[in-house]
Amino acid sequence: MSRSGAAAEKADSRQRPQMKVNEYKENQSIAYVSLRPVQTTVLIKTAKVYLAPFSLSNYQLDQLMCPKSLSEKNSNNEVACNKTKIKKTCRRIIPPKMKNTSSKAESMLQNSSSAVHTESNKLQPKRTADAMNLSVDVESSQDGDSDEDTTPGLDFSGLSPYERKRLKNISENADFFASLQLSESAARLREMIEKRQPPKSKRKKPKRENGIGCRRSMRLLKVDPSGVSLPAAPTPPTLVADETPLLPPGPLEMTSENQDNNERFKGFLQTWTGMSKPSSKNTEKGLSSIKSYKANLNGMVISEDTVYKVTTGPVFSMALHPSETRTLVAVGAKFGQVGLCDLTQQPKEDGVYVFHPHSQPVSCLYFSPANPAHILSLSYDGTLRCGDFSRAIFEEVYRNERSSFSSFDFLAEDASTLIVGHWDGNMSLVDRRTPGTSYEKLTSSSMGKIRTVHVHPVHRQYFITAGLRDTHIYDARQLNSRRSQPLISLTEHTKSIASAYFSPLTGNRVVTTCADCNLRIFDSSCISSKIPLLTTIRHNTFTGRWLTRFQAMWDPKQEDCVIVGSMAHPRRVEIFHETGKRVHSFGGEYLVSVCSINAMHPTRYILAGGNSSGKIHVFMNEKSC
């Protein structure tokens, strides 16, 4: 029997789960009952509680089994009071969620409890001890509450049990930390740190022999090897902002920068002064056939003698003198230089003369249509000058120091009136017959920037401007001082436009050069509300930062053909027909760079191209060479 009883007790201990009642702690919002069969030890005035399995939701007080000795000691009123407190405690401990979600746990506990009740006679003393432990735990919690209520120095009236316990813990913690005397200890440590001296350096100082210390550089001592003191270093010059000052107003003397021989220079001026105007028969000659035009182009070659170094900076503009007896080329450069080159002069170095009439890039050059001994140059510095070779001066035609000029053209055939484009989108009407260097009319356009200006060769009241992404055609008679509206706008471009030019003889075509790698040709035979697009020629116009932008120009002898530089290898200059077909490509052994700016002679088959290093490459017939 003893062995069977021990086995039953061991089985009962395995089947019966142990319940843990968690005590409510500070900073804990909800009390809960853990149904896991675990055993823990609580170190705060609590005894170990072992609860027999029973249903908490359907719990009845009369089913609790207590020993007779305990019921006999307490009166009926005390038992009823204890039962009421146990009910309140259980309701406070069990949250509503636990009641709803504990059905499975209750069924499991009931099954285990049924197995336990089958052996109730054998395990009666064990359950009696568990009930006594539960009553002891309840009484201890009641005693704790009564202790909190009687804590001296604290007023717990009107506070919940949790708040009373929390205040008591705060006061006990404050007393505990005050007993540690941490502030006094910190003060003593601070005094010890302040009194502690830094350790002495263990580095040994070098011993001086004969009162001489370590060697020092003579450069630092500012003495030469012989021991003599060096003179004081000169103060470095102050850096000045890199701004090119404007040249003084008024006429400038024509002084060559690269030639010192006065006799040779006088002969050069006489040569340019004696240039006659070309005959009207040659200029009014009609278009030649494409076949004969190609044949003439094939006869144009380049040689070492036709490559000239003219300026020090990139070429920004170029013009060919219309003379039929001599080959004269004018070049405008980045640093305000104007170079004149006579290809018939030998040796060729003696035929190059460079002048400096401007302080900033020369973006436009034209020989006067009325007087071939005059050359007009326009610069970013806001000046427009006329070089007169007969008087050897650069006369000032127009000056505006508050603006920067980009391009100009002649409104009249006698070169008396000019239209000037500004980089800020303004336009100026200049009359050379009026005394002074001011404008006749200044108007603002609807464009943010103007790069080129070109006048219609027949109807000279019309002129075309190229800007950021717009190309406009204006009527000079309708310009006003406020904002002039264009007659026609060409909106087919998607990027910035480098140039726009009418065809040279009739003006029936317009060619534009755009940064989207396209050359566009428009039909301008009828200037109405819209100009149709005829041809789009795919051509690489992306020159980058260091090369001058391409500008497609019409051949003045063949106005249905366009001349433009190329980025292709080997280097070349190409000619396209208005239909988009390539007519000819100029190249050769001596063309080794990109010619961004090109100009064709108005009556002869001579082509000059300028690159970004100040060189010009001239293609001409072998007979002319």
Image (tube, rainbow, N blue to C red):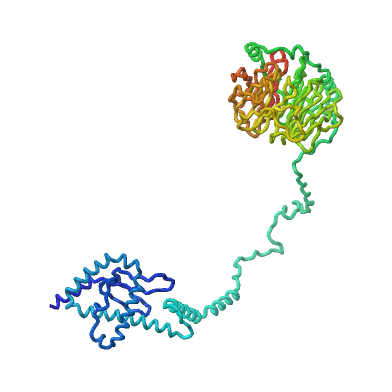
Q: x, y (%) of residue 144?
A: 39, 82
Count of numbered marks: 0
Q: x, y (%) of residue 564?
A: 65, 23
* In front of the other: 196 or 90: 90
Q: Is residue 276 left or right of residue 545?
A: right
* In front of the other: 424 or 312: 424
Q: Can residue 315 be seen in this view?
A: no
Q: Is residue 605 left or right of residue 142?
A: right
Residue 352 quadrant: top right
In the picture, the quarter occupied by the N terminus is bottom left
Q: x, y (%) of residue 596?
A: 66, 27
Q: In this view, does 599 lie to the left or right of 25?
A: right
In the picture, the quarter occupied by the C terminus is top right
Q: Is residue 48 visible?
A: yes
When the figure is inspected, residue 259 is found, relative to residue 198, above or below; the finding is above
Residue found at the far left of this picture: 1
User: What's the residue at 27%, 78% (across, down)?
Assistant: 61
User: What's the residue at 63%, 23% (across, down)?
Assistant: 522
Q: x, y (%) of residue 107?
A: 24, 67
User: What's the residue at 62%, 11% (across, down)?
Assistant: 291
* In front of the other: 531 or 182: 531
* In front of the other: 519 or 235: 519
Q: In this view, does 131 lie to the left or right of 565?
A: left
When the figure is inspected, residue 133 is found, relative to residue 518, above or below; the finding is below
